[in-house]
């Protein structure tokens, strides 16, 4: 078990090291997130809709779009120089490869979220200080599920012609339950509601995470084994 | 290889026959619904569309579930015929969900006063339609048959698991849609004549689904046989 985690971590670390050296995907997702926030600000009439009403949905739509952009790169990396074959030749189980890729993607999406959040506070003038812990928690809970599915889909779409277009078409329906849950919880957090009002949604998010992470680990070998 | 093509032809002929019977039965559904079923008191004639809308929704959901189940079987047994069946079921299901999504608003406008509402079941069926589209778009974008089969099977399985989550998450909004009238613990809350028409329509659309899928599956088999033969010639 311990070596299993270590191997998965090695794969994740390799992905993150490659990314930190080039920084292209990370930088472009961050710039993209910032731009979406700016554009959203012009897409509302400030005299009609207050920013606090709109804030949770703006935050989560931005995160969803930026995450799709970030997930596109996951297996693009392995396509160059046929490095996916190298990875598959390694004497480790397919599940380990998947978990490694998943962890790298999760770190990636988390980085995008951690930059989006302060920009969101700055542009939309929302006070998140009191609910910061809860907000980070719900971000983690919502992201785990859709990153798990997104990792599977990004492994598929690199084989298609319009990978950048294919990923959102497949992934956005799977983002619906985590997004609804995340927006509901964020709204309640920002207006200082008690935990009991969020419990149902949090449970839904947690079950989604457990079910889809398990399922994705199980189906991943079917994707890579010829 | 020729026998493969011949058996594909037989399947297509069977599909045509089943579809023909189903189409005649569908005509029967219209006659029965329009002439021999009473007009609903509050909704008037608009309610007649129910006998198309509900069976189409039923056929679409059945098609969707079968795509998921057969996809799982494919990953287990690796029989290419299962993949062809899943693809056929998805195409036919897409057609039925288009019928469901067009008749729904036509019925909704006079009765609810709105074409569309984000009610739980409407959202769910729309998502199923979008999942069908994603599934078929992915298939179209992959050229290697084995890759296409494996990838789309994964999407089929994940989609089937996603549906209860979407249902649960959108259900927590207020819902306009009528509560279940057929599959509920107590007696179905529909007058007997209307219920009979509905059940007849459901059976008819099931047959129509089987006819369509059989035909489409036969065609897929013929295409596979043809491309297999070209493969050996080359």
Image: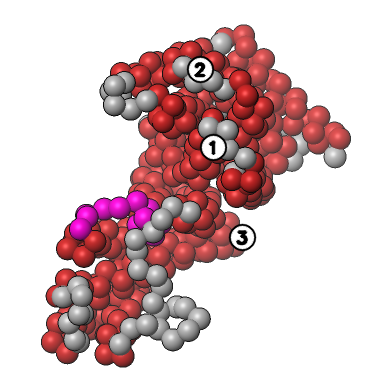
Q: Which residues make up the magenta segment?
A: B113-123
Other residues around mark 2 within 10 Å, as few (<14) / some (14–19) / many (≥20): some
Q: Which chain carries label 1?
A: A
Q: Name the residue under label 2.
A: A121
Give yes or no for contact between labels 2 and 3 (Cβ–Cβ under 8 Å): no
> Where the N terminus of chain B falls, by quadrant?
bottom left
Q: Which residue is drawn at 37% across and 25% down?
A: A50
Is B179 colored magenta in this rendering? Answer: no
The x, y position of residue B211, in whole percent, is 31, 74
Task: Pick out the residue farthest to the top.
Answer: A21
Along the line of sight, the residue nearer the viewer: A92 or A39: A39
Residue plotted at (19% across, 73% down): B43
Q: Which residue position holds label 1?
A: A188
- For this rendering, which residue is in front, B127 or A25? B127
Residue B121 among magenta residues: yes
Closer to the camera: disc 2 or disc 3? 2
- Label 2, label 1: how far apart the Cα atoms are: 17 Å
Figure check: B30 above or below B150: below
Q: Mark 3 points at which residue?
A: B76
Disc 1 crowd, CA 10 A, few/some/many (<14, 14-19, 20+) = some
Confirm whether circles 2 and 1 share one chain. Answer: yes
Q: Which of marks 3 and 1 is in front?
A: 1
Query: Which is the main secondary structure of the residues drawn in magenta?
Result: loop
The subunit letter for the residue under badge 3 reads B
Query: How far apart are the alpha carbons under marks 2 and 3?
Result: 49 Å
- Could you tell me which secondary element the residue under label 3 belongs to? helix
Mark 3, Cα crowd under 10 Å, few <14 / some 14-19 / many 20+, is: few
Are discs 2 and 1 less than 8 Å apart at CB?
no
């Amino acid at each position: 078990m311990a070596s299993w985690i270590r191997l998965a971590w090695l794969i994740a670390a390799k992905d993150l090291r490659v990314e930190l050296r080039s920084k292209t995907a990370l930088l472009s997702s961050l710039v993209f997130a910032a731009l979406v926030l700016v554009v959203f600000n012009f897409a509302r009439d400030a005299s009609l809709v207050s920013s606090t009403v709109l804030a949770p949905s703006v935050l989560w739509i931005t995160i969803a779009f930026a995450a799709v952009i970030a997930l596109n790169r996951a297996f693009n990396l392995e396509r160059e120089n046929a490095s996916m074959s190298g990875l598959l030749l390694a004497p480790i189980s397919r599940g380990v490869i998947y978990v490694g890729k998943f962890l790298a993607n999760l770190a990636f999406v988390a980085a995008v979220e951690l930059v989006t959040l302060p920009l969101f506070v700055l542009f939309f003038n929302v006070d998140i200080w009191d609910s910061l812990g809860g907000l980070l928690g719900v971000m983690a809970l919502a992201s785990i599920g859709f990153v798990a599915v997104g990792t599977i889909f990004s492994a598929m779409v690199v084989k298609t012609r319009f990978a950048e277009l294919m990923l959102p078409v497949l992934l956005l329906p799977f983002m619906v339950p985590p997004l609804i849950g995340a927006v509901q919880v964020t709204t309640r957090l920002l207006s200082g509601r008690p935990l009991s009002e969020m419990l149902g949604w949090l449970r839904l998010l947690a079950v989604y995470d457990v079910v889809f992470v398990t399922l994705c680990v199980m189906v991943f070998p079917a994707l890579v084994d010829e | 290889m020729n026998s493969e093509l011949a058996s594909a032809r037989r399947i297509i002929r069977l599909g045509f026959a089943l579809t023909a019977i189903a189409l005649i039965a569908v005509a029967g559904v219209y006659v029965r619904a329009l002439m021999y079923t009473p007009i609903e008191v509050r909704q008037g004639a608009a309610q007649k569309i129910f006998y198309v809308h509900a069976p189409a929704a039923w056929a679409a959901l059945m098609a969707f579930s079968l795509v998921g189940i057969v996809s799982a079987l494919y990953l287990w047994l690796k029989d290419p015929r299962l993949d062809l069946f899943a693809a056929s079921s998805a195409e036919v299901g897409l057609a039925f969900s288009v019928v469901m999504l067009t008749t729904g608003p036509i019925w909704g406008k006079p009765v609810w006063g709105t074409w569309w509402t984000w009610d739980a079941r409407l959202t769910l069926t729309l998502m199923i339609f979008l999942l069908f589209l994603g599934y078929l778009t992915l298939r179209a974008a992959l050229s290697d048959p084995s890759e296409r089969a494996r990838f789309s099977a994964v999407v089929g399985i994940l989609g089937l698991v996603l549906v209860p989550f979407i249902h649960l998450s959108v259900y927590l909004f207020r819902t306009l849609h009528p509560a279940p009238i057929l599959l509920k613990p107590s007696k179905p809350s529909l007058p007997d004549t209307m219920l009979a028409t509905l059940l007849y329509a459901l059976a008819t659309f099931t047959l129509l689904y089987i006819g369509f899928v059989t035909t489409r599956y036969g065609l897929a088999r013929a295409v596979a046989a043809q491309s297999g033969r070209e493969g050996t010639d080359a």
